[in-house]
Amino acid sequence: MTTTTAEHDGSGTTSTAYAAIVIGAGQAGPGVAAALAADGPVALVEMDRVGGTCLNHGCKPTKALRASAVVAHQARRAAEYGVHTGEVTVDFGFAIDRVHKIIEEEVSGLAGYIEGVDGLELVHGRATLATDPTGAEHVVTVDGRRLTSSQVYLNVGARASVPPMPGLDTVDVLTEVELLDLTELPAHLVIIGGGYLGCEFGQMFRRFGSEVTIVAASGLGGREDPDVGAILSQTFADEGIRVLEARTESVAPADGGVAVTLDDGTTVTGSHLLMAVGRRSNSDLLGDHGIETDDHGFFVTDGRFQTSVPGVRALGDVNGRGAWTHTSYQDSQIMLEPSRTVDGRITTYAMFTDPPLGRVGMNDAQARESGRRVLKAEVPMSGVSRARLEGETTGVMRILVDADSEEVLGATILGLQADDVIQVVGTAMQAGVRYPALRDALPIHPTVAEYIPSILTSLQPLDG
Ligand SMILES: Cc1cc2nc3c(=O)[nH]c(=O)nc-3n(C[C@H](O)[C@H](O)[C@H](O)COP(=O)(O)OP(=O)(O)OC[C@H]3O[C@@H](n4cnc5c(N)ncnc54)[C@H](O)[C@@H]3O)c2cc1C
Ligand SMILES: NC(=O)c1ccc[n+]([C@@H]2O[C@H](COP(=O)([O-])OP(=O)(O)OC[C@H]3O[C@@H](n4cnc5c(N)ncnc54)[C@H](O)[C@@H]3O)[C@@H](O)[C@H]2O)c1
């Protein structure tokens, strides 16, 4: 077993050798660090609170906050179900406080877990990395402390991208970090970006009572089939959210808030501005690391996460092979099982609007591009009996299969419980199940998932 050695170089700097150093306590780092600590001393370096984006200002706080927004919406619709509640008001301060309490518990639970692992040292501070091209001794510096190892794992994640725009330095720009720290509800939240972040936050804040305008260059849910984007747009319009399909050109202060000028000449004025136009890699925070990155700063890796420098591996968002907690966490599982590779991973994700969107594998456009002979089965959610029973008929359910190989190629579900139901298809795809086996499965009635076997009995060519 390798042991930690601490040496003084005469300048007062302590140099400590580890069996492995993990930088970033996000979704992959803690699990990998804990497992490696069984074989020798490991340092886990984190510059912020443990748990990374997901736990501190990503998936978990947003889904906790979404729960309040969904309840507000249901309460307003209660009369549709014969339930009478009186006037519905939202105490935003209470809702955000609830979120923070849940997150505090989870962060301290994770910190306690890390502290309890034998051989694992949590080092607080921002790490910079000087790699050794031979792979013999990489040097990580944290607050003047020198840590060395031949094995370095990078789980440094990504942060909100704030692209340059005239006037940005004259206004307060919020990212999700600051938005989740607000204690008072914005009067009018202007969101730049109509992707996952823009859609999820936009709908939540509208339901809390803010006026919301989303400026979305490629419409809502830009990566999805056009009809899915159109259903989302109609749902948002029905809830009173203004969506403008344009690019922002500049921003400026206005009436104690912000004015956003768009490329079609329109100007929108709001009290708060949220930037939600994608993520940028945190690889630059490591300093002059000498590792190959792509044009967007994501580390280039092979299927076992090996970077261009021997002994340095990159896991999670920063390797550009996924942009979700589940992909980052799965990277750590794959890393710890030598026979596995990330190559060929079937992408699956959800967008937690209400109703949610679930996606796995290909959508229509990707299926067309694949050059395969594709069959498609679909049903509007208004045709799904469970959705009708629950009064939640917005959306569509769609599955694509290969007519020749009978492979399941992908599915899009926008509608009631889509974030969970999609996983039936994802699991089948991972297991390599051919569509006739899925079609012939016995489903439970009345559920949303029962329509997966059911619609597979009426496959049609993709484009009619
Ligand atoms: C608002 C929002 C909502 C989201 N919702 C979902 C969702 O519902 N489902 C989902 O799957 N994904 C969601 N995501 C995406 C998800 O949060 C990320 O994909 C996930 O957190 C990535 O995990 P990671 O381990 O790669 O990086 P991170 O979780 O970002 O962790 C990286 C860690 O490295 C640390 N670090 C960085 N540089 C250094 C350095 N030089 N020295 C020391 N430490 C460093 C950071 O402080 C951080 O703790 C959401 C993201 C956002 C912003
Ligand atoms: N449910 C989830 O899993 C979830 C939720 C939120 C965030 N996330 C993660 O966070 C990442 C970032 O999400 P995001 O929504 O910020 O990015 P995104 O890439 O999903 O969407 C950004 C959108 O902004 C638009 N845009 C870019 N520049 C613009 C401009 N100047 N004016 C107007 N529109 C502009 C783009 O057309 C695009 O539609 C995602 O990739 C995802 O990994 C995941």
Image (cartoon, rainbow, N blue to C red):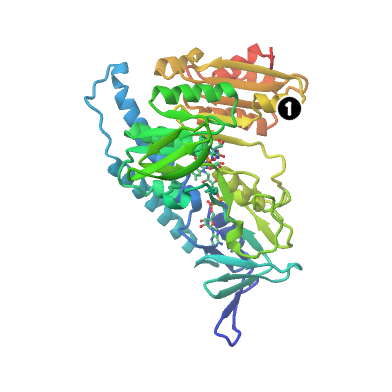
Q: Quadrant of residue 255?
A: top left
Residue at image location 43% in from the left, 47% down from the top? 174
Measuring from the top left, give residue 124's x and y in whole percent: 49, 66
Determine the residue located farthest toward the left in the rendered image. 86
Which amino acid is tagged 1?
Glu
Q: Is residue 290 visible?
A: yes
Measuring from the top left, give residue 358's x and y in whole percent: 54, 30
The answer to which of 189 and 160 lies nearer the viewer is 189
Q: Is residue 420 visible?
A: no
Which secondary structure lies at badge 1?
Answer: helix
Task: Determine whether 395 is above or below 432 in the image.
Answer: above
The answer to which of 107 and 171 lies nearer the viewer is 171
Residue at image location 57% in from the left, 86% down from the top? 11
Q: Which quadrant holds the C terminus? A: top right
Q: Quadrant of residue 349?
A: top right
Determine the residue located farthest toward the front in the rendered image. 265
Measuring from the top left, give residue 22's x and y in whole percent: 59, 62
